[in-house]
Amino acid sequence: MADYLNETIKSIMERRSIRKYKPQQITEQELECILNCGLHAPSARNRQNWHFTVIQNAELISWMNDRIKENIPNEVVAFCKEQQGGSEDYSIFYGAPTLVLVSGEASDMFTDANCGYATQNMCLAAQSIGVASIVIGMVRFLFSTPEADSYAKEFGVPDGYKPLYAICFGYNADILPKPLKRKEGKVNYIK
Ligand SMILES: Cc1cc2nc3c(=O)[nH]c(=O)nc-3n(C[C@H](O)[C@H](O)[C@H](O)COP(=O)(O)O)c2cc1C
């Protein structure tokens, strides 16, 4: 491994989900670089059938947080609260100033894979330029309410696309967590 410790591998190995952000907004250049890397991900049959909604409006982020908190199960609440000192004031977005809502074409069997590639491209690009990130699957609790379709329209999600999760971007306000231990037995070889 040491022989291959180039910048790409360093970004992969050092990326961690960050759960405490500075209020300072990331720069336009950083945002454009991250989005562009997402757009350059591979996709089945080159469909590129993802959609990214950039949300940098603090009021909207706060509204999303409130709606999601009304709908999430207790055990998830406990985890989020614990990460933020036990306060009722916790945010499921951990104070990040930028969210990218990732949506994929609902009818495509490879939507999850395509959007996953784009998401990891964005997280690794962010890591490589000093921007922290975390994927927030709990956004599904906003888009599983009876108002989901009208919310999706308001967020500019194209017809036929479903919102999957959000990615938070911002500057890390915490100590950098160490890499998590990897589970054993996840690879087998047939030679
Ligand atoms: C699809 C997906 C959804 C996730 N949703 C959340 C979430 O809602 N809240 C959260 O705190 N972390 C969320 N995470 C982050 C994972 O908890 C994290 O990736 C995992 O614990 C491994 O840690 P690492 O990213 O630092 O390696 C999500 C990750 C993925 C890939």
Image (tube, helix red, strand yellow):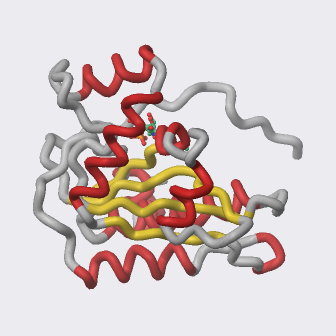
Quarter of the image for residue 32 reads: bottom left
Residue at horizontal 88 percent and vertical 42 percent from the top: 190
Q: Identify the residue shown where x is 22% and y is 31%.
A: 90
Q: Position of residue 23 (x, y in %)?
A: 12, 56
Where residue 82 sits, quadrant-wise, is top left
Q: Can you give x and y, in whole percent of width and height, for residue 182 in the image?
A: 51, 31
The residue that appears at 28% across and 71% down in the rendered structure is 129
Nearer to me, 190 or 130: 130
Q: Which is more toward the observer, 138 or 117? A: 138
Q: Quadrant of ligand 1?
A: top left
**What residue is at 27 percent from the left and 84 percent from the top?**
29
- The correct choice, above or below, for 101 with respect to 29 in the image is above
Front position in the image: 118 or 75:
75
Q: Does residue 191 lie above or below 162 as drawn?
A: above
Please state the horizontal and vertical placement of residue 4, each as a whole percent of the image. Answer: 47, 63
Q: Residue extending furthest right? A: 191
Judge left or right: residue 132 versus residue 50: left
In this view, 173 is above or below 97: above
Please state the total of marks drawn on the protein image. Answer: 0
Q: Position of residue 66 (x, y in %)?
A: 32, 38
Q: Is residue 3 left or right of residue 98?
A: right
